[in-house]
Image (spheres, grey):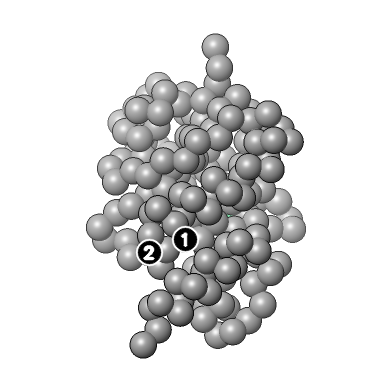
């Protein structure tokens, strides 16, 4: 039976940190469904459609190289519900630091209560990408800083475009 993983997140925007987790997930699952969360309370810079097409674009080399089947969807309900719809046995999350840990463990336990058949698997962030957070990357971009260490080129371009559209 093919193992299916569900990797939920905001991906606003997708970074080299997310890509590191996605590439390493190829060692655990045969298929990875990446879920772009769209929730009323969470204001995103990039639209769901932009986030999905950027993820599809920048994960293609990982799929080509590893044989991992990748699909990208959006969801506006519980991650466990979206994971179940995707046929996933595991939810994959990345852990950067202690604050990620506290929040993620609590969420995994609540998700485990809601859907005991789905296991959450944590992957420790790689040292080279551990410091990357989408929110900080957006701040750097807003202030005209270099984001090329954190984002694929196509994502940098899309981010600049979205910021230009937003600015008066
Ligand atoms: P969310 O709003 O769900 O936290 P994010 O897009 O910020 O959405 O993150 C999605 C997942 O990717 C989370 O599990 C997060 O911990 C993980 N992640 C984000 N950045 C990194 C990184 N630099 N290294 C490893 N994991 C990361």
Circles 1 and 2: CB atoms closer than 8 Å: yes
Image position of 91 with respect to 2: above or below: below
Q: In which quarter of the image is the C terminus?
A: bottom left
The structure residue drawn at horizontal position 52% and vertical position 69%, both measured from the top left corner, is 159
Frontmost residue, 52 versus 22? 52
The structure residue drawn at horizontal position 32% and vertical position 61%, both measured from the top left corner, is 42
Frontmost residue, 125 versus 147? 147
How packed mark 1 is, by other alpha carbons closer than 10 Å (few <14, some 14-19, many 20 or more), is many
Read off the residue under disc 1: 12
Horizontal relation, residue 156 to residue 38: left or right = right
Taking the view exactly as shown, the residue that stands out farthest to the bottom is 168
How packed mark 2 is, by other alpha carbons closer than 10 Å (few <14, some 14-19, many 20 or more), is some
Frontmost residue, 94 versus 102? 94
Horizontal relation, residue 71 to residue 26: left or right = left
Mark 2 element type: loop
Answer yes or no: disc 1 within 8 Å of ligand 1: yes
Where residue 52 sits: x, y (%)? Answer: 46, 49
Taking the view exactly as shown, the residue that stands out farthest to the left is 40
Q: How many marks?
A: 2
Answer yes or no: disc 2 within 8 Å of ligand 1: no
Taking the view exactly as shown, the residue that stands out farthest to the top is 1
The structure residue drawn at horizontal position 63% and vertical position 81%, both measured from the top left corner, is 145
Q: Quadrant of the N terminus?
A: top right
Image position of 147 with respect to 155: above or below: below
């Amino acid at each position: 039976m093919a193992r299916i993983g569900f990797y939920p997140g905001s991906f606003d925007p997708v970074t080299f940190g997310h890509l590191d987790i996605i590439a390493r997930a190829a060692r655990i699952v045969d298929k990875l469904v990446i879920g772009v969360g769209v929730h009323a309370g969470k204001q995103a810079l990039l639209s769901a459609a932009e986030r999905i097409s950027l993820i599809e674009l920048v994960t293609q080399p990982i799929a080509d190289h590893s044989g991992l089947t990748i699909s990208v969807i959006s969801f506006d309900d519980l991650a466990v519900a979206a994971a179940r719809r995707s046929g996933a046995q595991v939810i994959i999350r990345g852990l950067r630091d202690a604050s990620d840990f506290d929040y993620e463990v609590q969420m995994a336990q609540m998700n485990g209560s809601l859907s005991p058949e789905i296991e959450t698997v944590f992957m420790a962030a790689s040292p080279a990408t551990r410091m990357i957070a989408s929110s900080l990357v957006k701040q750097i971009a807003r202030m005209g800083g270099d984001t090329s260490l954190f984002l694929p080129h196509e994502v940098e371009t899309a981010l600049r475009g979205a910021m230009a559209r937003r600015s008066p």
